[in-house]
Image (cartoon, coloured by chain):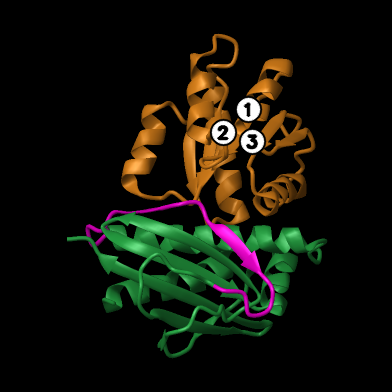
């Protein structure tokens, strides 16, 4: 898989954001941008080409789900692979995310292999 | 409190620490807590709605949560705010894991965003009156505690 893809990680929790970055870097991904809220994530997406979005569901202001909706409504970024990583593992929550067009959903806690598996799957589907 | 909830919190706590930090945790005997004092130095507290109402706190000794962070990130925590951050997120994850387990029993429980508290003998004020149930856990790096006060919504 292409490890030069640009990845945006949006999570208002510093621990999780750092952990996801660490997991990605350990697996050769280097082009990673981290933001702490949904609004900053959308600004970043407007400003730079992004190949993959990994976002937490719950963020202050613009949530991950709301960010997903904005991305899917935007002509330029609507097809960007989008993974939600969340403590929300209830069926109703996961169904909601897929209804809004999420590419895949990863429940916390998760192992690195699970995250990488989701990334591989969504990027293969997108290519 | 129904033993189903206690088991879900026990299994969730053990699973989250194992998966995220490769730390084995062993539960102790649950007991009633009639005061407001947290049993650890860093706590996350969140509220529940849906099939239950009430609140859940996860309270960590500093040594325990510092090791969790160190195992997750490969480095010691750089600041108190990072530790507080971690307490909140671990509370979130254990709550989420427990709620997923309870879903199989047709219990749909939603959780709010955790608030964090820190300091020796800080207080945890649950949403419901009355004693809470504490489930103590031991790890090789120190203790942590589930501190929960919930009731079924009829």
Q: Residue A121 vs residue A1: left or right? A: left
Indicate whether A10 appears above or below B146: above
> Which quarter of the rendered picture does the N terminus of chain B lie within?
bottom left
Q: To which residue does mark 3 refer?
A: A37
Residue A89 screen position, x and y as percent: 41, 50
Tell me: A98 left or right of B145: left
Which mark is drawn over residue A61? 2
* Residue B29 appears in the picture as rendered: yes
The foreground one among A92 and B131 is B131
Chain where mark 1 sits: A
Residue A110 lies in magenta, yes or no? Answer: no
- What's the magenta region? B104-123
Q: Secondary structure at mark 2?
A: loop
- From mark 1 to mark 2, how far is it between C-alphas? 7 Å
Q: Are marks 1 and 3 on the same chain?
A: yes
What colour do you see for chain B?
A: green
| Mark 1 / mark 2, whichever is N-terminal | 1
Give the residue at x 71% y 65%. B69
Write down the quadrant of residue B4 in the picture: bottom left
Q: Are marks 1 and 3 in contact (CB under 8 Å)?
A: yes
The residues tagged by marks 2 and 3 sit, at their Cα atoms, a distance apart of 7 Å
Q: What residue is disc 1 on?
A: A39
């Amino acid at each position: 898989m292409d490890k030069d893809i640009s990845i945006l990680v949006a999570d208002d929790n510093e621990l999780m954001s750092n952990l996801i970055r660490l997991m990605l870097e350990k697996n050769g991904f280097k082009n990673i941008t981290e933001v702490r809220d949904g609004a900053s994530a959308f600004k970043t997406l407007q400003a730079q080409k992004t190949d993959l979005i990994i976002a937490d569901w719950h963020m202050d202001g613009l949530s991950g789900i709301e960010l997903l909706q904005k991305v899917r409504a935007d002509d330029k970024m609507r097809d960007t692979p989008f993974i939600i990583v969340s403590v929300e593992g209830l069926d109703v929550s996961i169904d909601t995310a897929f209804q809004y067009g999420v590419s895949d959903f990863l429940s916390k806690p998760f192992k690195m292999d699970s995250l990488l598996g989701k990334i591989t799957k969504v990027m293969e589907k997108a290519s | 409190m129904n033993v189903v909830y206690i088991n879900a919190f026990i299994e969730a706590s053990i699973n989250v620490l194992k998966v995220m930090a490769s730390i084995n945790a062993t539960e102790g005997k649950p007991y009633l807590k009639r005061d407001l004092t947290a049993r650890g130095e860093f706590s996350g507290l969140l509220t529940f709605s849906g099939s239950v109402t009430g609140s859940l706190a996860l309270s960590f000794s500093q040594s325990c949560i510092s090791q969790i962070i160190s195992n997750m990130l490969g480095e010691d925590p750089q600041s108190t705010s990072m530790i507080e951050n971690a307490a909140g997120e671990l509370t979130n994850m254990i709550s989420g894991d427990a709620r997923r387990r309870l879903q199989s029993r047709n219990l749909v429980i939603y959780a709010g965003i955790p608030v964090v508290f820190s300091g020796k003998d800080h207080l945890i004020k649950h949403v419901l009156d009355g004693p809470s149930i504490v489930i103590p856990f031991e790890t090789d790096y120190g203790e942590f505690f589930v501190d929960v006060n919930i009731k079924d919504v009829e």
